[in-house]
Image (cartoon, grey):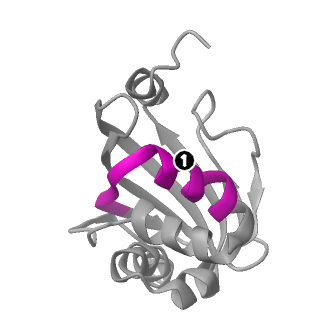
């Protein structure tokens, strides 16, 4: 049951579109960019096997400081990310999406700029927040993920600013 909920969370929480441009890169960096881009593609396609292969059991996933999903930082592995980040987002938001807009690559580092969107189920407030995702790629997998986003907006949308 836990895997089913996590799977549904991943599919719903990460509805994404492929990025449209690469701002910079180095030789060999395109492989790293392809790995990061394939995560967004896998989310959009609902490809759980691919998501699991990309995140693996040892990815270190860090949510932005002061955000609503930082309690388990760093989340380790797909199961940790699914239960600590994607599952709670699925429970809280309708039509949640993380839409990449630009990739910048240097070696094994990929920076993705984009926007989160969705509607908070309890408050009815719309989320439209910028994000920057920083990935460290190890071969064909994601070794590290760091999120930067407008945590003030996340908290305002969910009604938890004073907490």
Residue 66 visible somewhere in the drawing: yes
Q: Is residue 36 left or right of residue 135?
A: left
Question: Relative to 51, does residue 19 appear above or below in the rendering?
Answer: above
Looking at the picture, does residue 152 appear above or below residue 15? above
Instruction: Identify the secondary structure beneath mark 1.
Output: strand
Question: In the rendering, at what x and y percent does residue 45 appear?
Answer: 35, 83
Q: Quadrant of the C terminus?
A: top right
The magenta segment is: 82-103
Out of 72 and 55, give the one closest to the viewer.
Answer: 72
Q: Which residue is mark 1?
A: 147
Q: Point out residue 9 in the picture as x, y percentages from the top left corner.
A: 51, 64
The structure residue drawn at horizontal position 74% and vertical position 38%, both measured from the top left corner, is 71
Res 15 → quadrant: bottom left
Seen as rendered, the residue at the extreme left is 20
The quarter of the picture where the N terminus appears is bottom right
Q: Quadrant of residue 112?
A: bottom left
Q: Is residue 17 above or below residue 57?
A: above
Where residue 108 appears, as percent x and y from the top left, is: 58, 72
Q: Residue at x 50, y 71 (%)?
A: 8
**Residue at 32% from the left image edge and 66% from the top image edge:** 16
Give the residue at the far top of this rendering. Answer: 162
- Depth check, front residue: 12 or 154: 12
- In the rendered structure, does residue 98 fall within the stretch colored magenta? yes
């Amino acid at each position: 049951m836990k895997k089913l909920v996590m799977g549904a969370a991943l599919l719903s929480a990460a509805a994404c579109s492929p990025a449209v441009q690469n701002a910079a890169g180095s030789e060999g960096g395109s492989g790293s960019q392809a790995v990061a881009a394939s995560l967004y593609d896998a989310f959009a396609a609902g490809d759980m096997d691919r998501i699991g292969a990309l995140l693996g059991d040892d990815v270190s996933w860090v949510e932005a400081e002061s955000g609503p999903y930082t309690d388990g930082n760093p989340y380790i592995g797909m199961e940790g990310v699914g239960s600590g980040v994607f599952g709670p987002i699925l429970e809280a938001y309708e039509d949640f999406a993380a839409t990449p807009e630009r990739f910048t690559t240097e070696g094994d580092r990929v920076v993705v700029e984009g926007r989160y969107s969705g509607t908070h189920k309890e408050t009815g407030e719309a989320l439209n927040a910028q994000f920057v995702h920083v990935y460290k790629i190890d071969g064909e997998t994601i070794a590290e993920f760091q999120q930067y986003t407008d945590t003030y907006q996340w908290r305002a949308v969910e009604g938890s600013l004073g907490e």
